Amino acid sequence: MTAQFPMIRPRRMRKDAFSRRLMAENQLTAADLIYPVFVLEGEKQRESIASMPGVERVSIDLLTDVADELVELGIPLIAIFPVTPADVKTELAEQAYDPNGLAQRAIRALKQRQPELGVMTDVALDPFTIHGQDGLLDETGYVMNDETVEVLIKQAVSHADAGADIVAPSDMMDGRVGAIRAALESDGHIHTRIMAYSAKYASSFYGPFRDAVGSSGNLKGGNKYSYQMDPANGDEALREVALDLAEGADMVMVKPGMPYLDIVHRVKTEFKVPTMVYQVSGEYAMLKAASQNGWLDEKAVVMESLLAFKRAGADAILTYFAVDVARWLKQG
Ligand SMILES: NCc1[nH]cc(CCC(=O)O)c1CC(=O)O
Ligand SMILES: [Mg+2]
């Protein structure tokens, strides 16, 4: 005999705040947050981004103030994205591995200011190529895999040399995780973690990010379909994750976030490894625009979206809302 209504009333547990809190299966904390920041050349530079209201690009001196705030709020990790001036972009992306490049200087400044704040870097060539693609092009405009990986290795090692705690290849070249891991090991960087953007989709939700780093106007070919994944696919994501783990990734990532919760869940269920998710620029823009119009309650929808990532299985979330969220969590 199975119990039924009226003995069974699921609403009993939902009636009061204490019992709702008691049975909550998931919880969001500041330790779940990773804050992406766009970094500018110069001093005391602060620029807003039209398609990401509330997000600013900042120069390194102001970036270190951000680091203080993150530590104060209990956010474990900052992810930096250099905004490369157009005049240093090249076909071969040499700036990507310049020991005195913007990213490398930012890493050193951050580690000096706040040694306990984790610093993560993006490993991909799009901020440094004239054409805005993540790798080197052949004469037909195809992004060459193996030649690109050679440059990514140099970029990742230069980040580790500068003190990066985590390098995050976001380029989707084949074999890059293994190649970067081998280079880090042979250079003595045995503690440098790799967060692989393993299931990175060719998404139109990256539009505002490309505005932020100034790579949208110059994106030759207009898309990244020959290396980022087709949104139609799920099994392919599991294969990419399996490969990156076999090649030495410490953590994997699914990107974008909200439209890909099924992928987050499948990855976590299948592999049981640290699984990160990126609430990307277009997701930020949607939530922000609707909130600014008074159509959505910003705090409520942002908190709900992040809790949903936790429920799907994410261990941490890259989000442009990280600082706001940590403040809200602190207020209780
Ligand atoms: N390879 C660069 C990179 N790293 C993170 C993002 C997107 C992040 C966002 O939209 O917030 C991108 C853009 C892209 O692949 O075109
Ligand atoms: Mg891959």
Image (cartoon, rainbow, N blue to C red):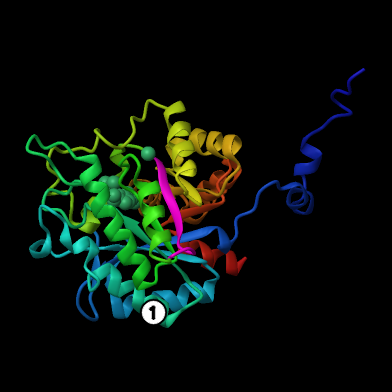
Compared with 96, 161 (above or below) is below
Q: How many marks?
A: 1
Q: Main secondary structure of the magenta part?
A: strand
> Mark 1 belongs to which amino acid?
Asp
Residue 315 coordinates in the image, percent (x, y): 57, 51
Q: Tell me: residue 29, above or below residue 230.
A: below
What is the magenta range? 189-200
Q: Which residue is mark 1?
A: 65
**69 displayed left or right of 63:** right
Residue 228 seen from this side: yes
The answer to whether residue 280 is seen in the rendering is no
Q: Residue at left 31%, top 73%?
A: 106
Is residue 82 shown above or below 112? above
Residue 304: image x %, image y %?
Answer: 54, 48
Query: Quadrant location of the N terminus?
Result: top right
Q: Is residue 140 magenta?
A: no
- Residue 160: name its quadrant: bottom left
Q: Is residue 25 or residue 103 the one in the foreground?
A: 103
Q: Residue furthest top?
A: 1
* x and y percentages locating residue 190 in the rendered image: 47, 63
Q: Residue 235 or 153: which is nearer the viewer? A: 153
Q: Quadrant of residue 128?
A: bottom left
Q: Quadrant of the C terminus?
A: bottom right
The residue under the point 59% across, 69% down is 331
For the residue pair 270 and 78, the one nearer the viewer reads as: 270
Label 1: how many Cα within 10 Å (few below 14, some 14–19, many 20+): few
Report the residue that reaches farthest toward the front: 186
Camera-side residue of 301 and 28: 28
Give coordinates of residue 283: x percent, y percent.
38, 46
The residue sitting at 13% across, 54% down in the picture is: 92
